[in-house]
Image (cartoon, rainbow, N blue to C red):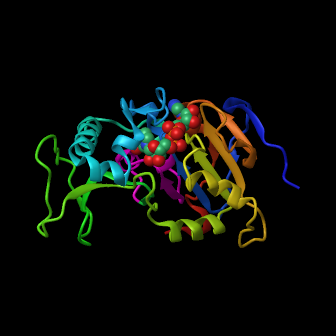
Amino acid sequence: MIPLTKVAPGREFAPLKIARGEKIFVLTGAGISAESGVKTFRDANGLWEEHRVEDVATPEAFERDPRLVWRFYSERRKRLASVLPNPAHFALASLPEVFLCTQNVDPLHERAGSTQVLHMHGEISKTRCSSCDREPFEDAAGLYFDALPRCHCGGLLRPHVVWFGEIPLGMREIGEALDDCDLFLTVGSSGAVHPAAGFVSHLRNVKNRHGRFARCIYVGLERPDNAHSFDECRLGKAGDLLPSLFDVPSFVGAEGSD
Ligand code: NAD
């Protein structure tokens, strides 16, 4: 039987004990970057930076008006150039081992020191070709407010982000890590954007290699839409709660390290 979700201010919960060898899957959403000054998706009236999502973040929008789409992403690139990570990003970067999967296209996990980050919705600092299979490339300084950028193949270049209606990146790797995890933590995600919003309900049906269900914990400002699938929803700001969220055993000096 699935236990009832416990929902309360984060400070009322004890730190999460992590046993040696436990596998942690962390999914982050726009909320983790909010305290760094990056607007979340649901900031104002369903508008994203004053634009309707359909006008700037769908393949149809790019086909209809690539200049508007590039202006939107160039503006976001410009702003993200000077944004700093906050204590929540640093807390995750200090964990010894974690599968870190983000829906965010910003580079704040990397700026905090995380080295292995799966950006399932792409990375805003990268550009790729909409026609050929050229690898996505770092293009943080590429601001396209007027002329449209072209690939050497002649195709139109596009931001390396996953738009609504497109398939997220790394789904096979994500599926494997989910099925194997002992602890699933989501930080700052409304639980409204799929497939990420469905990861937690998937874990309600899949036992890990130990034959157990993963513990599922949510940390964020308010109850997410998928709150019922979590064991606990710890409410509060990610930057306040994450630095003291984990009780991780010290590995230093254990097992006669040299
Ligand atoms: P969302 O905007 O739908 O939800 C954000 C969630 O974060 C909300 O539930 C909100 O209560 C919570 N939140 C706000 N401030 C918080 C804080 N300080 N601490 C903890 N939680 C806080 O975001 P989503 O679920 O990630 O989905 C939106 C989509 O928009 C994603 O696909 C994402 O790629 C994209 N997006 C990305 C960025 C970014 O890269 N930083 C920013 C906006 C949107």
Q: Reply yes or no: does residue 98 show up in magenta.
A: yes
Is 176 rendered above or below residue 229?
Answer: below
Vertical position of residue 233 compared to residue 58: above or below: above
Describe residue 88's horizontal placement relative to residue 134 as left or right.
right
Locate residue 162, reporting x and y percent.
39, 55
Q: Residue at x 41, y 40 (%)?
A: 53
Q: Is residue 90 visible?
A: no
* Residue occupying the point 62% across, 63% down: 23
Can I make out residue 43 in this image?
yes
Q: Residue furthest top?
A: 44
Q: Nearer the viewer, residue 80 or 227?
A: 227
Q: Pick whichever, 76 or 185, lies toward us.
A: 76
Q: Residue at x 20, y 58 (%)?
A: 157
Return the residue found at the far right. Answer: 1
Residue segment shown in magenta: 92-115
Q: Is residue 7 left or right of residue 169?
A: right
Residue 10 percent coordinates (x, y): 67, 33
Magenta highlight on residue 249: no
x, y percentage for residue 190? 58, 40
